[in-house]
Amino acid sequence: MKRAINFGAGPSAIPTEVLEIAQKELLDFQESGLSIMEASHRSKLYENVHNEAIALMRELYKIPQDYEVMFLQGGASLQFAMIPMNFNKGGIVQYADTGVWSSKAIKEAKIQKLNIAVVASSKESEYNHIPSNIVFDDNADYAYITSNNTIYGTEYKTYPNTKAPLIVDASSDLFSCPIDWNKVDMLFGGAQKNAGPSGVTIVIAKKSLIQQGASDIPTMLQYRTYSENNSLYNTPPTFGIYIIWLIMQWIKAKGGIEAIEKLNTTKANLLYDAIDNSNGFYVGHAQKDSRSLMNVSFNIKAKDADLEAKLVKVTQDAGMIGLKGHRSVGGLRASIYNAVTLDGVQALVDLMQKFAKENA
Ligand SMILES: *Cc1c(COP(=O)(O)O)cnc(C)c1O
């Protein structure tokens, strides 16, 4: 068996150790004679997995007691619609536009005909940075940011201060670095980039915010339904939650979120150094002060599409996948989420240096 080095943006790499455990337990989980997939979501067998996953997420992410940890479905994209449905109170809803994903969130608020303020945008410069000095109105219904911009490879180094509830789309940097919960009222993401398989959306929200949510919308679209029922109002995505549980155990064994962040920083620095020391052969998309630790987007020279396609081919021949950049930016993108190893990143850097020498 040969495993690819997976630089895909999402769904993306899952630690081999985790997949091996899942494989071993697939037919007979904890001597139950069942796959966890086949177990009732009301059984003790499953409930233990569910509750341990939540407990580990709380422990690793240092989530305060007055926050709820919930499992939803519909991807991060359904959150774009649910957030305004639940939290607009007829006032202003505010967004920072830092890329395609924030634009899509704004679009859903527009469909609901809300009073929207886009307080900052980096659209004019191809979303290559996080605008500085973002100022949200403290009296708005909520303030919304995308912490890591998966396509452009930019991330907030600190979240903006605001007294309005701050809501963060952390789909592509979940569990990659510590969170300052003093600033955040709700943080969410599809699990499939850094925290598990697709099909599970993780939502962590302050209980007081959840309680203020609208109650004249469908039951399944109210956060309180998940909060009041420990995400077991209806059948949750049980197998995905099981994988999240295994991934949390894996993060803990690695030394926790701080250790993971340190490793992520080492991996990202390795790649950014290779770009910066290439005499202009490689050009990073993001401005240096906005560079993401998760997604490294870059071009070759002035977007030399032929050379870029050639490099993608070379990486594929070397057993690497997922390096073709998003169509809106072109070039290449290396997504180096938690599960991508330092050895994997080193292999890519070696290959990039060799390629630059041969094609300069
Ligand atoms: C991938 C991604 C999304 C979309 O997630 P889905 O689960 O596919 O809906 C939203 N926001 C960000 C930042 C993403 O990276």
Image (spheres, helix red, strand yellow):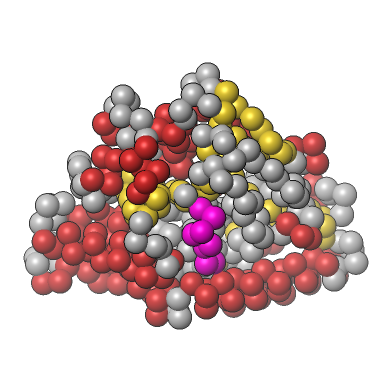
Bounds of the magenta segment = 176-184
Would you identify the image quadrant in which residue 7 lies? bottom right
* Res. 341 in view: no
Along the line of sight, which residue is nearer the eye, 260 or 161? Answer: 161
Locate the N terminus and report the quarter of the image it occupies. Answer: bottom left
Count numbered badges in the picture: 0
Above or below residue 164? Residue 117 is: above
Would you identify the image quadrant in which residue 222 lies? top left
- Asked whether, in this view, residue 209 is left or right of residue 45, the answer is right
Locate the C terminus and report the quarter of the image it occupies. Answer: bottom right
Q: Main secondary structure of the magenta part?
A: loop
Would you identify the image quadrant in which residue 320 lies? bottom right
Does 182 lie within the magenta span?
Answer: yes
Above or below residue 35? Residue 217 is: above
Above or below residue 229? Residue 338 is: below
Along the line of sight, which residue is nearer the eye, 250 or 4? Answer: 250
Residue 325 x %, y %: 67, 49
Residue 193 x %, y %: 49, 55
Residue 249 x %, y %: 35, 73
Residue 315 x %, y %: 66, 62
- Asked whether, in this view, residue 281 is left or right of residue 108, the answer is right
- Asked whether, in this view, residue 150 is left or right of residue 55, the answer is right
Q: Residue furthest top?
A: 113
Question: In percent of the image, x 69 and y 43: which residue is there?
Answer: 135
* Res. 123 in view: yes
Question: In percent of the image, x 30 and y 56: which residue is there?
Answer: 241
Along the line of sight, which residue is nearer the eye, 154 or 6? Answer: 154
Above or below residue 93? Residue 182 is: below
Question: In percent of the image, x 44 and y 53: which residue is there?
Answer: 192
Question: In percent of the image, x 57 and y 23: which residue is there?
Answer: 115
Does 219 lie within the magenta span?
Answer: no
